Structure formats: structure tokens, C-alpha cells
Amino acid sequence: MLSFDLRTLESNAARVDAVLATSDGVWLDSDVKPTEGVHVTGRLSAAGPGRFYFSGQLAGTSRDSCRRCLVEVDTNVSDDVHLLFAESGGDADEVEDPDVFLIDAREYHLDLRPAMREQWLLAVPALVTCREDCKGLCVNCGADLNLGACTCAPTLDPRWSALRSLDESAR
Ligand SMILES: [Zn+2]
Ligand SMILES: [Zn+2]
């Protein structure tokens, strides 16, 4: 469970130890999702009237395509998370602050899922490569050059192609 009763939280901090599942409705199709959910651990406590503080960690495995050869790459992701939740209608500065998550004062529950989704997306690497020296795909035939050279002719240096077209038009 990643949803907490606000009235209980006012008097007692909650220990958070839950998994935001890959199948959860909070994810968008375009998100780099965790392969087996995001494990969220930490502590959620009241931090003054209408304010709650989460301190903890998230961990999971992201799966994305190598930007050079498109093979799927799994990356272990873990990050410290410190978040402040504040009831909307409070301090105007907090409304502007992107690090403060606003919660509806009429709600009885604090749902950590949207914030954890956001933190996860910030933590996953933007561009992954399967290995440092990935050779990528041939731009001509699409062959995976990590498996060996393809049969395409070596690409000409673009500086020579201008000369070659001159040569061909002269014939
Ligand atoms: Zn690759
Ligand atoms: Zn090729």
C-alpha cells in the first residue's frame, strides 16, 4: 500500500515498505517502467499542520533500449527520496515549488504513487547503452555491427563524395 490515512499520520509516523507495481494505473504508456515494480521504503510523518514529509529510498530495475543498437538493457536504479507534501491553499511559495507535492485538503488519504512515479522517472538514466563500445547498427542495412561487419560497402568519407559527383558529371 502506498496510500496513507492523513488523520493517522498526524499522530503517528508511518513506515513505508511497498511496491509500486509495473501494472499500476499511475504509469503512462510512454514511461520507462520498472521490470518488477519500484520498491519504496522509508518513513512518512507529519511536518506541521497539513504538511507531511517522506524520507526514504526507491529501488527497481528499468528496461530501455540501447540508443545505438536498440537491444534491451536492464539498469538497476536506486535513489534517495525526500519529499514534502502540503495541503493546497497554504503557503503561496510552496505552490510554485516543484519539490513540494500538493495534496487536496479534502482528501483523507495521502497517495504516494504519483510522486514515486515522478521520482522514478527522474532516477532512470535518460540514455542507455548496452556497453561502452557498442558499435550500433549499420545505417544502411540495419545489421548489428556488434555481431561482425555487414556486407555493405564501407561508407565513403563525405568530403570525397563531392569530388566523386564532380568526376561522374564530367563523364
Ligand atoms: Zn548497444
Ligand atoms: Zn550494412
Image (cartoon, rainbow, N blue to C red):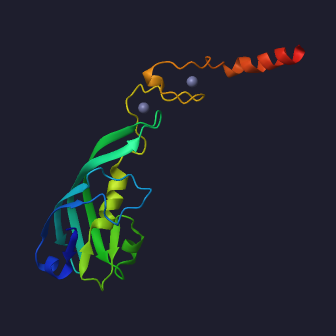
Q: Along the line of sight, which residue is nearer the eye, 138 or 61? A: 138
Residue 77 placement, left or right of 136: left
Tally of numbered tags: 0
Can you give x and y, in whole percent of width and height, for residue 40 in the image? Answer: 21, 58
Q: Residue furthest bottom?
A: 106
Q: Residue furthest left?
A: 12
Residue 12 placement, left or right of 2: left
Can you give x and y, in whole percent of width and height, for residue 133 in the image? Answer: 41, 25
Vertical order, 42 against 77 (above or below): below
Q: Where on the picture, by quarter, is residue 37?
A: bottom left
Residue 72 placement, left or right of 18: right
Q: Along the line of sight, which residue is nearer the eye, 4 or 34? A: 34
Quadrant placement of the N terminus: bottom left
Can you give x and y, in whole percent of width and height, for residue 10 in the image? Answer: 16, 79
Vertical order, 127 against 151 (above or below): below
Confirm whether residue 89 shows in the render.
yes
Quadrant placement of the C terminus: top right
Q: Where on the picture, by quarter, is residue 8?
A: bottom left
Q: Along the line of sight, which residue is nearer the eye, 35 or 103? A: 35
Q: Quadrant of ligand 1?
A: top left
